[in-house]
Amino acid sequence: MRLRRPDDRSILPATYPVSNLVLSIVVSACLGALVGLIRQWSDQKASPGGEADFGGVRTYTFWAILGCVAAFLSQTHAAAVLPIVLALVGLHLTALHFNNPASIHPGSTTFAASLLTCLLGALVQWEYTQAAILVATATAVMIGLKQPIHAWTRAFTVDDIRATLQFVAITGVVMPLVPDRNLGPFDAFNPYSTWLMVVLISGMGFAGYLMMRLLGAKAGISITGLVGGLASSTATTLAFSRRSKDDPTLSTSFALAVIIACTIMLARIIVVIGVINRELAVSLIVPFALMAVPGVAFGLWVWLFDRPTDNDVATPRLINPLSLGIAIKFGIIYAVVAFLVKAATHFDLRGGLLPLSFLSGLTDMDAISLLMANSRNDASVAPLLATQSVILAAIGNSVLKGCFALSLGSPRLRRQVALVLGLTIAVGTASLWLVR
């Protein structure tokens, strides 16, 4: 028999199944215990040897059961029971706030987590079990991430905050105001689409930048290269190639970071394209997977036979991807490449699109990749041509990073990176015929 939801005006039968209530109490208790477990662990982690100051597994289990029973009583006896219980919980927490020293009184997180735990018990009773699980999961995650979030914020500089606020403010102003229509010669420039691509790429880069800030100098070689590939594989290649000359004994470690960054960049491009054009992303999976084989093989070889002895490396110096300067530069590159693509298709020079893609990959692979992803709205660019263009851009980007490593790296790094990226370029060239 279904439990009555709050908006159900029907009258519950006098013989309400006890099994339904028991099941709701059990589920609520489990979810409350989950939140309480994470809360208790977080408090004990912050104060080794101490106990949770304002509730742990037992307290949050009781909060959830209290919410469930109160919701049941509100359904069957008096509608005011649940509001009264929530008010009492709130008053209890408020009293704890004022009756304890300022250094240990419960904060807003405790207040919110306690009320949410009561309410998730009510959600279970009202048969919104999936929503209750989501609330419990989100609450537990946010409690458990207290220390990492503090580490993130401490790692930010004034320039990081300023760049982020500027980007958010400008985007909030630009996006609603700019026209969403094609302008200029060949209708090549769409202000709204251009800035939307800037937001997409900057957001992806910012996610990697945040992770890099969090990892800091304690990051292992592999993780540094992985996150560097998300933030900026070009900057990672430059940074570690230069460092290999200063410390040639770690050349293999630095080469591994470069190769991982260049390899993960291929996966990042597929994800970015997939957000806009799923068909194009699917068509790139096999070619990009083949291009990633040399990098993966090199990583396995290093891990099995030449594992780095020093896993603590300095974080490459990266510029916040939300910097307005970087965003505007990408927007300009995107607009210029868009104009050249439109011009090539307008004058029926589709054969020139492939060399253009290669040259674009030498400067910024994201621009041509996003343009090809948007090509589904342009019948003049066939799906096959779009796929080949992105592959050629990836080849051009690999050539650029190979040149950086050859010109800036130590002899050992040059040999290793040249071999792997050379194979990547060869496989990419062969895959152009594979997608025919």
Image (spheres, rainbow, N blue to C red):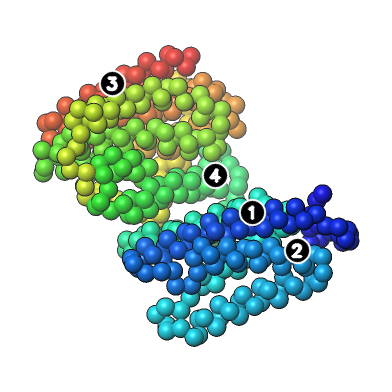
The kind of residue tagged 4 is Ser
Toward the viewer: 78 or 402? 78
Q: Secondary structure at mark 4?
A: helix
The percent position of residue 288, horizontal first and vertical second, equals 41, 25
Q: Amino acid at mark 1?
A: Val
Marks 4 and 1: which is nearer the front?
Answer: 1
State the CA–CA distance, disc 1 to disc 3.
55 Å
SS state under label 2: helix
Q: Which of the two marks, 1 or 3, is nearer to us in this view?
A: 1
Query: Which residue is under mark 1?
Result: 27
Q: Identify the secondary structure beneath mark 3.
A: helix
Question: Separation of disc 2 and disc 1 at Cα?
Answer: 14 Å
Q: Nearer the viewer, residue 128 or 250?
A: 128
Query: How far separated are the C-alphas under marks 2 and 4?
Result: 51 Å
Choose top left, top right, bottom left or bottom right for residue 294.
top left
Which numbered tag is attached to residue 72? Answer: 2
Please report the residue visible at 31 percent of the width from the left and 18 percent of the height from the top. Answer: 426
The residue depicted at 55 percent of the width and 54 percent of the height is 137
- Labelled disc at residue 423: 3
Closer to the N terminus: mark 1 or mark 3?
Answer: 1
Q: Is 234 left or right of 9, judged from the image as shown? A: left
